[in-house]
Amino acid sequence: MPANHGPSVTPYGRTTVDTQALFFVSYDGLVNNNSFQKNGLLTYRSYQYAVWYAADRNAVVGRRALGESSWATVKVGHTLKSDDSHNVMSMGVSTIDGRLHLNMDSHSDSFTYVRSVSGLLDNPSGLSWTANRFGAAQPTLDGLALTTLFTYPQFISTPEGNLQLSYRAGISGNGRNALAEYDGTSWTNLGEWTSSTGVYRSEHGSSAARNMYLHGIDYDLDGRVHSFFTWREQNGAVMGASGGIANHDTGYVYSTDRGRTWRNDAGIVVGATGSTSGCPGPIAVTDSGLVIDSLDADHSLMNQESQAVDSTGLPHAIVSYVPGRFGQCTTNYVADRTNHGRAFHLRKNSSGTWTKTEIPIALRSSQRTRLVLDKYDNAYAVLPRGRIAGASKSSGYRDWTLLYSGSGLNAFGGEVVIDETRIRQDNVLSVLYQEKSTGTTTPSALHVMDFALPS
């Protein structure tokens, strides 16, 4: 890698997606700007797509030709049912038939699904962007019912052009991760691949139920699926004090067969999708070799942070929590993370070992940070309020520095949404963010800011 190809971000354009997007604060975040949306913003071929809720609560999908400033918008026939910021909208592309898929408005209850006509994304200049290009809003995946306790949709395109949907069945502290798959004709429920049962013990107490929160689920160039995660215990007795959050440990698993079976870092099969018992069954907290960075439940560890895979297939993640130098037992999740929270870059080295580096920039927020990698495998942490830090691969990712302060954005003090697909396509970092509201529920503008990464 040439020495001068270190990390850099050069702002070169901002577009307004909606001048009056829905605004309310829930779980300290916004429904249009939760960083765990996969994808709230994506690029396919020469167009960029975004989803959000407008001021009238209508679900909207927009598109623009890359380089253009105006967005064409379509209401897809659904209105947000409650003021819950986790009821996000996510998009996916089935490249096998050129459809855009949307899943929205769920938090441990029913979801809404909409898909476009075949070929809409393959011929954007030839097909008008109108409501009749989308099917009716449905409570199933074209007739396939999944669960009545559905949350956190994440679409993933497979190397063959199919589309997978990752989701949680159940509730926080008692849920299971699951997969469904679309092959261009129909959806199939592949089943659950994690378990909520088993006993976890800390120095304070024990818990008999939990859920695995994913940092993401991503294919690398060789077709391997990578996923970092944290555990959330149902019983707060595992914490030393109330007021924190019962998340502990960072784990890692991967799959070489499109998510049918799962392996720990040592390559041992630890879980099978759709298996309720037997060997292997679903992944459980009691399985060995899952944890790659241990941390007890007393440090307000964030769930669903972020991850990325570099050009050589090595996995990277962001984890954030209150380090021990600020105390060994958090008592107020939001306040302690805002005052003392730090983000860390966790990565696997070519030697097979794991390294964690603190990003020396205070979070000043309880919310999540997004990780992206450029074509030179430099790392970028997109922090709350749209700040961007970077570190070079050549330094071993030890030279983290603030590259963009976010000043002038007037961004809400929480998370932003990243266009993962555009980075891979043309080395541009697109950030979807919402401005602060002038009141508690007054609609505010939603923007996309574009940054050129090293060429």
Image: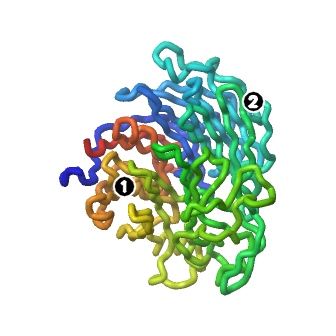
> For this rendering, which residue is in front, 300 or 385?
300
Q: Amino acid at mark 1?
A: Tyr
Residue at numbered disc 2: 142
Q: Position of residue 265 (x, y in %)?
A: 54, 63
Q: What secondary structure is found at the residue carrying circle 1?
A: strand
Q: Position of residue 288 (x, y in %)?
A: 64, 71
User: Which residue is at 34% across, 50% downward?
Assistant: 408
Q: How many marks?
A: 2
Above or below: residue 110 compared with residue 123: below
> For this rendering, which residue is in front, 368 or 252?
252
For residue 59, side relative to residue 137 (left or right): left
> For this rendering, which residue is in front, 228 or 386?
228
User: Which residue is at 45% across, 43% downward?
Assistant: 221
For residue 131, side relative to residue 366 (left or right): right
Residue at numbered disc 1: 380
User: Which residue is at 44% across, 65% downward?
Assistant: 352
Q: CA distance from mark 2 to mark 1?
A: 38 Å
